[in-house]
Structures are given as C-alpha cells and as structure tokens.
C-alpha cells in the first residue's frame, strides 16, 4: 500500500474507534471484526491492522492496571520459587504457562507478517470466523465441566490455550473468544477461563502493538493513535470488570448468539450491497 493510500482517522474518529476496540477486546466477540465492520457501516475507510494493533496497547494498559495486584503477587511468588528451585509452586507453573503459551502466536504472527504483511481482513472471512468460533464456543459451553479453579492451572493449560490463541490472527475469531473457548474445553470455570485469557493476552498485546508502532511509525498517525489508545484503555477497563462479573453468574450463550447474528448480518450486508468486501 502506498503511503498516500493510508487513511489516518481524525481525533474524534479515533476516539470512537478506541471505544469500539475497548468494548470488544476482552468480550469474546472480536475487536478486529468490529473495527473492520463499524467503519464500513458509517462510510469510513478501514484504519488497517497497524492502527488496530497500536490502540490495543490501551487495552494492555487496562489489563496491567486491573490485575496489578495479581501480577505483583504472581511475579514475587515466581521469583521466590526460582530462588528455591521449587518449580512445582502454583505461581511458577502459572507464569511459565503464560510465557510458553505466548510462543505460538508470536511465531505464527511473525510468519504472517513476513510472508503476507497482515492477515486477511475481508468481510467474508470475518463473517465465517465469527460464526465458526460461535459454534466452537457453544460446543465448549455444552461439554465443559467448569470444575477447575485458578489453583489448578499449569504449564499444559498455557500450551493448549496458547495454541488456541493463534486462531485470533484470523480476523473475526477473537483472541479472548478463542482462549476462553479453550479454557472451557479444559474444564475451567467461566470466570477463571476469562481471567486466564486476560493474563495470557498481556505478552501478545504488548508484542503486537509494540511491533506495529515501531515498524509502521508515522508522525501523521501519532494523534489518532494516542487518542485511540487512551479511549481503548478506558473502555477496556470497564469491559474487563463487566465481563468477570457477568461470567460469575451467567453463561457465554449471550456471546454465542451475538456472534452468529453478527456473522449473518455481515453476510446480509455483503449480499444486499450495503457492506463492501
């Protein structure tokens, strides 16, 4: 893409796009999909994968602040386990699981970046991914026993959930949707699966946002990126708090039905012509 072809949202457009990012990043309905579909509905150009990745840094900051106490305890306990060479401690297993679980999406993401530049963002792909993950999430909701709590998490959980996280490189899948689905298949409680999804997303969000900011740095984009990042931070924090409380008392069927409806809406829009592929 030529530099002249790149669209930079103005400050109020970036504010709205940041709000969309924040509200949908951690809820399992795909932030990337909504950042692709919403501009198409209102007649804006696609801001692109780079803008999306950079404003995700606001979502990352929201996770770091929301779970600051948990992260501090995890790191201190893991350091204590390392000093004592006690690698069976719960905190150590959880930390290693998060780090190992990050490797698949880093490797696959870099391969896509080198070979194709960015994943496909066509609306047909997003529609198929939205519906496909909804069916998987429904299956996990039906079959998962939801009997495991946070104390049972180990390295293998990180590996399996981390492999599922690579599916989020397909727009429309949703990183949180893929990881929560994997967590339910592993018989985690819903709120534990969501919390683990948030923690596992910290390295992925940092690497994706940082890489895109450095590799595609443009002075013209700084204002929109800054406004979008701040907006994403505020609404991400609110959505994290809401989702954890929601999953303590409710199932994921609301998101399953929403994803199916969202996917069908895209198909309808493409068929009738009020959305362009």
Image: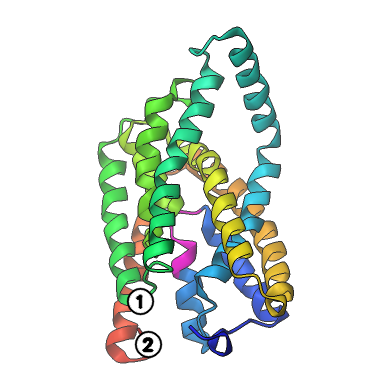
Is residue 243 toward the left or the right of residue 225 in the image? left
Q: Nearer the viewer, residue 66 or 277?
A: 277
Q: In the picture, which quadrant includes the C terminus?
A: bottom left
Q: Are marks 1 and 2 in contact (CB under 8 Å)?
A: yes
Residue 128 rendering spot, x and y as whole percentages: 28, 67
Q: Earlier in the sequence, mark 1 or mark 2?
A: 1
Q: Nearer the viewer, residue 140 or 49?
A: 49
> On residue 123, which mark appears?
1
Vertical placement of residue 81 versus 128, above or below: above
Residue 179: image location, x then y, percent: 41, 44
- How far apart marks 1 and 2 lie (CA) works out to 8 Å
Q: Residues in magenta?
A: 27-33
Tell me, for residue 276, which label it has, or none. Answer: 2
Report whether residue 230 is seen. Answer: yes
Identify the residue shown where x is 38% and y is 86%. Answer: 275
The structure residue drawn at horizontal position 65% and vertical position 14%, both measured from the top left corner, is 80
Provide the secondary structure element on which disc 2 rests.
loop
Q: Is residue 113 magenta?
A: no
**Quarter location, residue 235:** bottom right
* Rendered image: mark on residue 226: none
Name the residue: 67% across, 50% down: 62
Alpha-carbon neighbours of circle 2 within 10 Å: few (<14), some, or many (≥20)? some
- In the picture shown, does residue 132 fall above or below 159? below
Q: In x, y percent, where is residue 216?
A: 59, 70
Q: Secondary structure at mark 1?
A: helix
Do we see residue 192 in this rendering?
A: no
Q: Position of residue 37 (x, y in %)?
A: 45, 76
Which residue is painted at 54% across and 28% down in the image? 95
């Amino acid at each position: 893409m030529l530099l002249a072809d790149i669209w930079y949202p103005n400050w109020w457009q970036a504010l709205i796009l940041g709000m969309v990012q924040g509200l949908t990043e951690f809820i399992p309905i795909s932030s990337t999909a909504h950042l692709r579909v919403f501009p198409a509905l209102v007649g804006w150009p696609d801001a692109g994968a780079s803008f999306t990745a950079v404003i995700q840094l606001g979502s990352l900051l929201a996770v770091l602040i929301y779970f600051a106490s948990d992260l501090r305890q995890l790191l201190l306990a893991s350091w204590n386990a390392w000093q004592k060479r006690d690698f069976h401690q719960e905190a150590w297993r959880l930390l290693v699981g998060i780090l190992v679980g990050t490797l698949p999406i880093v490797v696959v993401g870099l391969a896509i970046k080198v070979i194709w530049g960015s994943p496909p963002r066509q609306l047909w792909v997003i529609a198929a991914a939205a519906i496909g993950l909804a069916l998987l999430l429904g299956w996990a909701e039906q079959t998962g026993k939801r009997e495991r709590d946070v104390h049972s998490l180990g390295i293998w959980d990180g590996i399996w959930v981390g492999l599922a996280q690579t599916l989020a490189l397909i727009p429309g899948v949703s990183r949180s949707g893929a990881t929560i689905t994997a967590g339910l298949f592993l018989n985690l409680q819903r709120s534990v699966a969501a919390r683990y999804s948030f923690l596992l997303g910290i390295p992925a969000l940092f690497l994706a946002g940082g890489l895109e900011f450095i590799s595609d740095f443009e002075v013209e984009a700084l204002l929109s990126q800054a406004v979008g990042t701040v907006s994403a931070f505020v609404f991400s924090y609110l959505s994290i708090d809401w989702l954890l409380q929601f999953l303590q008392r409710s199932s994921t069927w609301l998101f399953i039905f929403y994803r199916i409806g969202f996917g069908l809406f895209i198909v309808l829009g493409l068929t009738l012509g009020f959305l362009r592929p």
